[in-house]
Amino acid sequence: MKNNTEAFGENVFSLPVMEQRLSGSTFASLKKTIDTGSELDASIADEVAKSMKEWAMEKGATHYTHWFQPLTGATAEKHDSFIFPDFKGGIVTIFSGGELIQGEPDASSFPSGGLRATFEARGYTGWDPTSPAFIKYDGAGAATLCIPTVFCGYHGEALDKKTPLLRSMKVLSEQTVRLGKLFSIDCGDTMANATLGSEQEYFLIDADLYAERPDLQATGRTLFGKASSKHQQLDDHYFGAIKPRVATFMADLDLELWKLGVPAKTRHNEVCPGQFELAPVFETLNISVDHNMITMEVLNTLAEKHGFACLLHEKPFAGVNGSGKHNNWSIMGPDGKNWLSPGDNPHDNAKFMTIVVALMKAVDTHAGLLRASVATAGNDHRLGANEAPPAVVSIFLGDQLTDIVEQIEAGGASSSKDGGDIHLGVDLLPKLPRGNTDRNRTSPFAFVGNRFEFRAVGSNQSPAGANVVLNTIVAEAFDCICTQLEDAVAGGKEFNVALQEVLAGVIKAHKRILFNGDGYTDEWLDHAAKLGLPNLVATPEALEVLASEKTKDVFAKYGVLSNEELESRYNTYKETYETVIGIEANTALDIAKTLIVPAVVTAITEYSEVAAVAGITGEMSSLLEQVVSGIAQLESAKGATAEIAAMNELRASVDALEALVPADLWPLPSYNEILRV
Ligand code: ADP
Ligand code: MG
């Protein structure tokens, strides 16, 4: 079979497609909005809508939808056909500029954390022209033009993940452009952009086995299951040869994504058997977020087509690795260059070091908020479990960069660990070799040569939340540093002298956030506690950061989230957490009562006649008693913490029974069977 390279990008209404199909003036106006973030000229909307409709209909689409990202963390759509009566007994197709720009999906059942009750129940969607529209084929004959939109309340209150993301990109751009000017980079009104590449880990299991696991179906993870004797201990799956059935799936996946303009690049086996990874090439942040949401959806639907179930949960299986979503983040300046790439000359390096130091300030000031941005019930299983970063947020810079930071703090960098002169300023900074940073897999926030990698995002999460936080806190740090520099220069100080002083001050205040060692050790956790770095182990305590004055202030100051919008998120995420744990508890109870107990009773009955296995029978009986009391305990548990503790206890007895009960009587497919696609 040959891949159809002509299909690449065929389902996306990209800029080149628009350039071809729109009039010159309309395209130019739209492009200006995209490049500069200026307001959309509503008078072009009719032409864009008509062109979009024609293009979509050529591709078989009969419907369009405003495609948005509510606080559930998933995507949402409500299809409308292009159909309209001609009032002569026939039918015409219409898609107006008004319909493109704004929708009223009602959508009153999405979580709003109380926000909508106080305003108006109705929600509105608004076109995001910066992210291209695309066509989704859901089934035979079902093709829909999907238009990425924001989702807001009547007064513009954000009810979704995209609105604050776009706002945060704007403030980051403003502060980046301002910083650029201090380094004599002036590109008019061109925006700076954050860039994102989000590596996506996932599990594939056989669909038939999935159908026999009510826990996976209801909660995305196994609530019971004894570790198999051989799983990932030999690291023989990681980067191993990809089995044909999986390779076929991956090829299909890549092609589907490429058709949608998602630049899927890397595919490989991950550490755990049955676990895989897909990494795209990085893109402008909001497009990359949209593309990750599309990727998760295509993973799920294609898996089904290939007889698999795709598990995106952070911890589908206990005792083996879970899945994350490494968030590779950088800043592309208005000059189109990556500003986290160490430059060839001292001037660029001074800018680079300024950004690195600003990140230290941002992450140290808001370490708890970053942690809160990845706080979900699923991710709690992963953070700090010696496979993913610890819940303590720190920054890894590697030895060489750390050394330079220390020299700046001490009054000026004048030598590099690699030799050669380094000074801060036009003739004052070292040549920084690229990509020579060590790999430290234990760090939650690591510099990796030309970008930072935030490794704590959960595999199942929208990447939006973490990046809203990153953009906003970095904008705040830039703002503060720019103000200090501007004031010093206005006061007559030479720029390089001012820069040295300002950076040294920031480093002094925030260097505790740097940690190059092993983040999994207890020594680090103890030390981090002494340094005052927050260690927010579980979601409930992490989410409290969203209610703090510091968080409210930074979001409100930069117009990313008002206090009310933030509070609504806090309420929503808390409620989601409790609901998820509640569903897990109920599912565990169902399985224990209706599947596990009967199987164990059968086993005990069968064994009871045979004296030779009396020992095993006795063991099963006493474990069964534990299961029964575990059920009672879980039934009476109130609140997430108690439910989690009771589930863990129940699981321990059930998993011990799985080791004793005859395999053909055990009602759930074992880890051994599941983890071997
Ligand atoms: P690794 O597993 O070594 O981290 P991968 O290739 O799996 O490497 O993933 C690296 C990710 O980082 C890719 O998505 C890549 O496109 C992305 N990336 C590279 N440069 C940048 C950048 N400037 N901004 C954002 N992401 C980037
Ligand atoms: Mg990576």
Image (cartoon, rainbow, N blue to C red):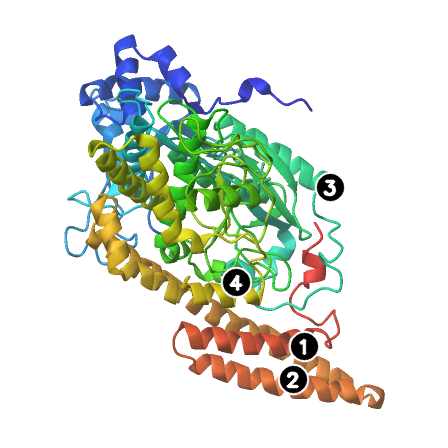
- Residue 535 appears in the rendering: no
Residue under label 2: 623
Is there CB contact under 8 Å for labels 4 and 3? no
Mark 4 and mark 3: Cα distance apart in space: 29 Å
Q: Is residue 78 above or below residue 427?
A: below
C-alpha gap between disc 1 and disc 4: 21 Å
Q: Which residue is mark 3?
A: 243
Could you tell me the amino acid type at mark 1?
Ala
- Disc 4: which residue: 381
State the residue at coordinates (72%, 80%): 603
Q: Secondary structure at mark 2?
A: helix
Residue 190 vs 634, above or below: the answer is above
- The label shown at residue 656 is 1
Where on the picture, by quarter, is residue 649? bottom right
Contact flag, marks 4 and 2 (Cβ < 8 Å)? no
Q: Quadrant of the N terminus?
A: top right
10 Å neighbourhood of mark 1: few (<14), some, or many (≥20)? some
